[in-house]
Amino acid sequence: MHIVGRDDADDGRVQSVERATDLLQAVADAAGARATVTELAAATGLNRATAWRILRTLEAKGFVHRDPRTRSFTIGTTVVDLARAAPDDSWTSRAHEVLRTLSLQTRETTALAMLDEGDLRYVDEVNPPDRDHRSWLGTTVDPKHATSGGKVFLAFTDSEAATNGSLPRYTDTTITSRRALDRELAQVRSQGYALCRGEFWSESWGVSAPLLSSDQRLMGALSCWGPATRGEPERFAALGSLVRQAARGLVTQ
């Protein structure tokens, strides 16, 4: 016989499950130092001991991953596997195939970010078979002014509000002038894709194109990135065209 306890909400919901899903969402929303157990507990209103027990359980099941060096949590592979277990004819599956094809064409990492609560969040990615790349799944596209995906976001939203007027420098090529950024965003809207030329990490470049609805509202961004050693200027136009075409194809599927 099941005895209703404190973990069972009056409306049939299970409190412990709600706490686990709240923590999963908090991990997805957080990044870096903000994803420690202390910060995640604060974000979800849980005491640290409770948050720690739930996170360790989620980690054991592969829903989150804990970096032993920084002690911060990221979304685990089980979440990705569940998303990819959707029916083959789902939009998610077709989007993954687009990423896979684009990665094969370019021999670079490809990623899909979708608009989620007013921000772009990475929901899928494909790495070339010969490359071990840091996963960005579950993280938001940031910083906005120094990444190609962030520039897509700024180009089709209120860029002033999104950057809070702050344009910190990360590398020698980071755009730190409001006027220069506005010119860049106008070019993004004109050509249909954004570029990042080592502006966040000097050793990395990227190309991103928007996913736009029929009324030109931003739904997401499709990105392709790789090491700066292969980011020759003459290659950007071809990659931009490929990514833009792939993004438009996703919207019409």
Image (cartoon, helix red, strand yellow):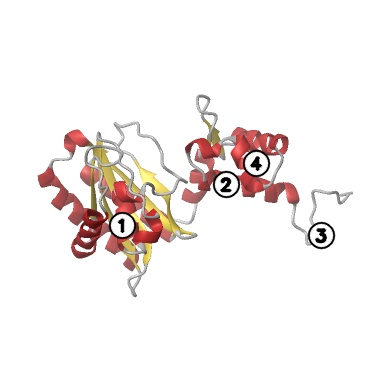
Q: Which residue is mark 4?
A: 41
State which mark lies toward you, 4 or 2: 4
Residue 82 point in image, percent of width and height: 52, 47
Which quadrant of the view contains residue 159?
A: bottom left
Residue 251 shows up from this direction: yes
Proximity of marks 1 and 2: CB atoms separated by less than 8 Å = no
Question: How many numbered circles does the render carry?
Answer: 4
State which mark lies toward you, 3 or 1: 1
For the residue labelled by badge 4, is the local secondary structure a helix, a strand or a loop? helix
Q: Which residue is mark 3?
A: 10
Residue sitting at x 25%, y 33%: 203
Q: CA distance from mark 4 to mark 2?
A: 9 Å
State which mark lies toward you, 3 or 4: 4
Q: Which residue is mark 1?
A: 152
Q: CA distance from mark 1 to mark 2?
A: 25 Å
Question: Observer-nearest residue: 24 or 165?
Answer: 165
Q: Which residue is mark 2?
A: 26
48 is higher (above) or lower (below) than 86: above
**Which comes sooner in the sequence, label 3 or label 4?**
3
Furthest residue in direction bottom, as rendered: 215
For the residue labelled by badge 2, is the local secondary structure a helix, a strand or a loop? helix
105 left or right of 67? Answer: left
**Which comes sooner in the sequence, label 1 or label 4?**
4
Q: CA distance from mark 3 to mark 4?
A: 24 Å
161 left or right of 174? Answer: right
Residue 109 point in image, percent of width and height: 30, 41
Q: Residues within 10 Å of mark 1 (few under 14, many from 20)?
A: many
Residue 70 point in image, percent of width and height: 51, 28
Amino acid on which the number 4 mark rests in the picture: Ala
234 left or right of 209? Answer: left
